[in-house]
């Protein structure tokens, strides 16, 4: 019997026909990268292949050479044809379509269905087997439409500003940060950014994928010039002397995990905004249905529960263990772009 | 409901007392009168009677969400709260509608009187009109338990600010058996206290743990010392020829303790006693474990009454001849208490908790050391000039407890917590050595920092040997010092013992599993202190 199109190894997802790994977590000779988040794009591989925007981000973050393959273009590698398709997770993020001898498998990477005005919108790809993330693969996770969350964030910022307080909003520096900035109403006040966020801003601006104006917080930054600003920073910057220089402030955090009251309270942020770059429960089910696939491999998230549910709906679903602790709540701890 | 949901969100999202108080004050000033009254009621533990079981709520929610029940059950421990799980799992409201909090409470109260089918329809209909936060609150109205970090003191302060009634008077009014159904906002908050409530207790005066040396309190003669009893704190109220018994949790428990039914025969009306209810036999207290079956039972079988009769050891007199005497010095209140109780018959179910008179701290310390042999947890030290203040005011009343007992034990099972601790492993079962094996002997949930729970959670995930539903059996490797206040024989437990107030005093990273304590060691503690 022939090799399966893709197999699950201890280095990550492997395509034997092309002798290439997808988002591997150990160093491999050849890697396909779905997007530039650090748990997917790791250092140490022999070669990298990604979409142009992801390639630009990887060069910026890892300082390695990356070969580019634009969305929708097929590339023949060994016995396989590989192509990237928009995943809607962060700018440049891709699903990977792999075709070997007429059989099509798709690796979703991380994805969301709702257009955010920033990424290339998610594109459903027909396939026989679908390897899907399920970070939020429980029916309690449902997101509000983006404009509603934007209104909440702007109202919070406006109220803080009227009270003379800064608004410190924590977000992953690639993707979520730019998405939040694009949702802010620049009429309210100045938007300041942490260095990590500004680094991603610059790469995306250079690629023409981000146009909002921001003010980077530099070492010689004068806080009096920007009273009660909105500050976008990785949450790790909170509670440090860097964060204190903005004076009285409210902290907020934007993540799908903020849907859960227990997590909001444990994180100790004053305000949680429920906004995620991952698919919620209805979107996961919709995405799976749209692929037309019969074989589903849930990975990264509540995999056991999600696979069991898919089986009860008639799919051939097998959970795939991941390197990220393999447990139901690894995502919350890893601080990824949830 | 939107205003109440906003208030709830504000209270839930800040840890600053000042912000909580101002959010409450604002609500008490602005909300419709019925909503204010209900908010006070809910935050002080009063709620509509439960008319639907949580089992039914789960089934209805799963059905409405179009998911199998097992998937609901899998989601629940991850969310960590049933009312919240239901709120989140339902599809968005089809027909959002704004109604007052009191109107929704009306719906909840109406559930009891209608047919089961109509009940279901009413709940599904409500869910379909509410957003997730409002739904969460609506579900809490049904299931109970608004635990959102609003202390009585904080609410009293906000009510005082909103109404102009001073704080102590407000605190007193919030006590007792009033229900929002039979009270108006004006009755609760008007300048003149118009309500006749014969059963109303006073706010309990609370003690602080004494951490400094006792000698730092100055002259021992300025202090009255008593045993610190391990029972149920209560107020016994005699007014108008009848008696009422209140627990410290402000629950009316009169019917659970028929022993006090005769007290109006020999105590004068207009009397309020503060004391400890203990299971008591042959002139001495019984272990707390024997009082325990009496606490939950609303009606008491004869057998239990004979096995574990109770009495109150009174240590304060708050009302004397119908007069509130809380402002008098403790020495004066105590003298009146002793005079009142001195002539009572031996089977009166009420007696004065004895004063322990010593003229040196050293002698008092020696008394404290002997506390366990009196089935006591240590000493109470109360300043002789102190008034009976509502709540906890540091400085006048101290609890000078014995150091806890402790053993070193190994964790063998772990389970995730709820609420703020959902997704963290915080509930552990511990074992001691029994020959070459291990025998479980207690559970404990508290005593570690959040960072330690985080670290243990990661460890548990990597070291799970087997799962039994939500419980994980882990490699017996992590050693903890388990502290506890008492130890009892217990045939219900495999180890044959039960602990009182077990908690994790320390994570003993330095200690290998070989060196933990043994079942023989626990049995020796049982002989010495049980």
Image: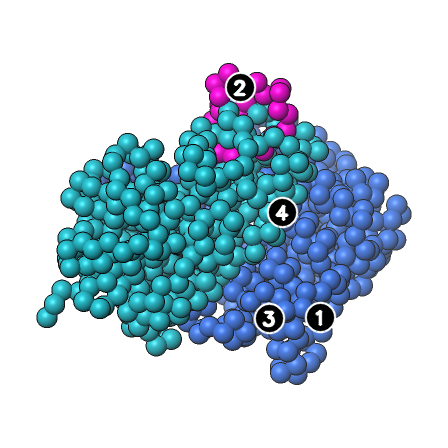
**Location of residue A316 with respect to A267 vertically, above or below:** below
Q: Dot 3 surroundings within 10 Å: few (below 14), some, or many (20 or more)?
A: few
- Residue B163 in magenta stretch: no
Q: Position of residue A170 (x, y in %)?
A: 50, 38
Comparing B89 with A273, the one in front is A273
Chain to which mark 4 belongs: A
Q: CA distance from mark 1 to mark 4?
A: 30 Å
Residue located farthest toward the top when viewing the structure as drawn: A220
Q: Which mark is residue A221?
A: 2
Range covered by the magenta-colored residues: A218-245
Q: Residue at x 12, y 67 (%)?
A: A2
**Secondary-structure class at tag 1:** helix
Determine which residue is flagged by label 1: B107
Determine which residue is flagged by label 3: B299
**Secondary-structure class at tag 3:** loop
Q: Residue at x 49, y 74 (%)?
A: B66
Q: CA distance from mark 1 to mark 3?
A: 31 Å
- Residue A229 in magenta stretch: yes
Q: Are marks 1 and 4 in contact (CB under 8 Å)?
A: no
In this structure image, what is the colour of chain B?
blue
Determine which residue is flagged by label 4: A152
Q: In the image, are marks 1 and 2 on the same chain?
A: no
In this structure image, what is the colour of chain A?
cyan
Q: In the image, are marks 1 and 4 on the same chain?
A: no
Q: Residue at x 15, y 44 (%)?
A: A29
Nearer the viewer's eye, disc 1 or disc 4?
4
Q: Are marks 2 and 3 in contact (CB under 8 Å)?
A: no
Q: CA distance from mark 1 to mark 2?
A: 56 Å
């Amino acid at each position: 019997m022939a090799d399966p199109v893709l197999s699950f190894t201890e280095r990550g997802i492997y395509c034997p026909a092309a002798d290439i790994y997808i988002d591997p977590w150990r160093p491999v000779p050849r890697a396909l990268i779905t997007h530039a988040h650090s748990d997917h794009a790791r250092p140490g591989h022999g070669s990298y292949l990604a979409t142009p925007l992801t390639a630009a981000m990887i060069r910026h973050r890892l300082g390695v050479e990356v070969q580019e393959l634009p969305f929708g273009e097929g590339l023949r590698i060994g016995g396989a044809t590989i192509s990237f398709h928009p995943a809607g997770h962060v700018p440049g993020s891709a699903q990977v379509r792999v075709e070997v001898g007429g059989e099509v498998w798709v690796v979703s990477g991380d994805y969301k269905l709702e257009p955010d005005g920033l990424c290339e919108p998610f594109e459903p790809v027909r396939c026989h087997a679908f390897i899907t993330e399920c970070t939020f693969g429980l029916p309690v996770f449902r997101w509000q439409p983006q404009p509603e969350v934007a209104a909440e964030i702007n109202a919070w910022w406006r109220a803080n500003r009227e009270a003379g307080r800064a608004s410190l909003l924590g977000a992953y520096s690639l993707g979520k940060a730019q998405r939040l900035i694009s949702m802010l109403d620049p009429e309210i006040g100045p938007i300041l950014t942490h260095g990590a966020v500004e680094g991603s801003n610059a790469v995306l601006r250079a690629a023409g994928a981000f146009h909002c104006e921001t003010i980077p917080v530099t070492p010689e930054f004068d806080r009096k010039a920007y009273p009660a600003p909105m500050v976008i920073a990785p949450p790790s910057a909170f509670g440090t002397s860097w964060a204190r220089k903005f004076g009285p402030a409210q902290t907020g955090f934007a993540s799908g995990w903020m849907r859960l009251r227990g997590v909001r309270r444990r994180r100790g942020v004053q305000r949680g905004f429920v906004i995620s770059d991952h698919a919620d429960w209805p979107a996961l089910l919709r995405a799976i249905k749209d692929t037309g696939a019969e074989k589903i491999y849930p990975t990264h998230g509540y995999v056991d529960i999600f696979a069991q549910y898919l089986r009860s709906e008639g799919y051939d679903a097998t959970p795939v263990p991941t390197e990220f602790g393999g447990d139901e709540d690894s995502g919350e701890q890893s601080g990824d772009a949830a | 409901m939107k205003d109440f949901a906003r208030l709830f969100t504000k209270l839930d999202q800040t840890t600053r007392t000042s912000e909580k108080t101002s959010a409450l004050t604002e609500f008490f000033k602005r909300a419709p009168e019925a909503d204010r009254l209900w908010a006070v009621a809910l935050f002080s533990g009063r709620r509509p009677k439960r008319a639907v079981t949580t089992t039914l709520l789960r089934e209805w929610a799963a059905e409405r969400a179009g998911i199998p029940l097992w998937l609901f059950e899998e989601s629940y421990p991850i969310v960590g709260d049933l009312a919240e799980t239901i709120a989140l799992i339902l599809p968005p409201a089809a027909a959002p509608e704004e109604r007052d909090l009191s109107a929704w409470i009306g719906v909840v109260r109406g559930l009891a009187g209608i047919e089961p089918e109509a009940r279901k329809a009413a709940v599904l209909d409500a869910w379909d009109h509410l957003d997730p936060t409002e739904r969460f609150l609506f579900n809490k109205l049904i299931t109970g338990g608004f635990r959102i970090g609003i202390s009585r003191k904080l609410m009293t302060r906000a009510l005082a600010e909103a109404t102009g009634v001073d704080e102590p008077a407000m605190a007193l009014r919030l006590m007792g058996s009033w229900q929002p159904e039979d009270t108006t906002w004006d009755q609760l908050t008007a300048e003149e206290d118009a309500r006749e409530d014969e059963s109303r207790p006073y706010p309990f005066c609370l003690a602080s743990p004494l951490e400094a040396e006792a000698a730092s309190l100055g002259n021992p003669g300025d202090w009255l010392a008593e045993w610190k009893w391990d029972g149920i704190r209560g107020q016994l109220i005699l007014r108008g020829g009848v008696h009422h018994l209140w627990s410290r949790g402000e629950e009316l428990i009169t019917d659970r303790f028929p022993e006090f039914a005769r007290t109006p025969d020999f105590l004068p009306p207009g009397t309020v006693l503060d004391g400890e209810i203990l299971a008591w036999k042959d002139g001495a207290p019984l272990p707390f474990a024997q009082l325990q079956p009496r606490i939950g039972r609303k009606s008491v079988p004869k057998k239990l009454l004979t096995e574990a009769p109770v009495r109150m050891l009174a240590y304060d007199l708050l009302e004397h001849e119908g007069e509130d005497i809380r402002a008098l010095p403790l020495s004066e209140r105590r003298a009146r208490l002793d005079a009142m109780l001195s002539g009572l018959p031996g089977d009166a179910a009420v007696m004065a908790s004895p004063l322990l008179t010593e003229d040196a701290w050293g002698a008092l310390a020696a008394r404290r050391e002997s506390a366990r042999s009196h089935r006591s947890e240590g000493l109470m030290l109360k300043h002789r000039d102190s008034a009976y203040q509502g709540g906890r005011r540091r400085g006048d009343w101290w609890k000078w407890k014995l150091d806890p007992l402790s053993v070193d034990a190994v964790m063998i099972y772990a389970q995730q917590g709820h609420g703020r601790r959902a997704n963290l492993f915080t509930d552990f079962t511990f074992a001691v050595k029994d020959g070459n094996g291990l025998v479980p002997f207690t559970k404990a949930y508290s005593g570690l920092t959040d960072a330690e729970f985080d670290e243990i959670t990661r460890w548990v995930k990597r070291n799970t040997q087997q799962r039994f539903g939500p419980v994980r059996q882990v490699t017996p490797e992590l050693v903890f010092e388990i502290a506890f206040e008492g130890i009892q024989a217990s045939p219900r437990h495999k180890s044959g013992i039960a602990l009182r107030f077990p908690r994790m005093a320390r994570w003993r990273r330095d200690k290998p599993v070989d060196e933990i304590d043994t079942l023989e060691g626990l049995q020796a503690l049982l002989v010495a202190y049980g």
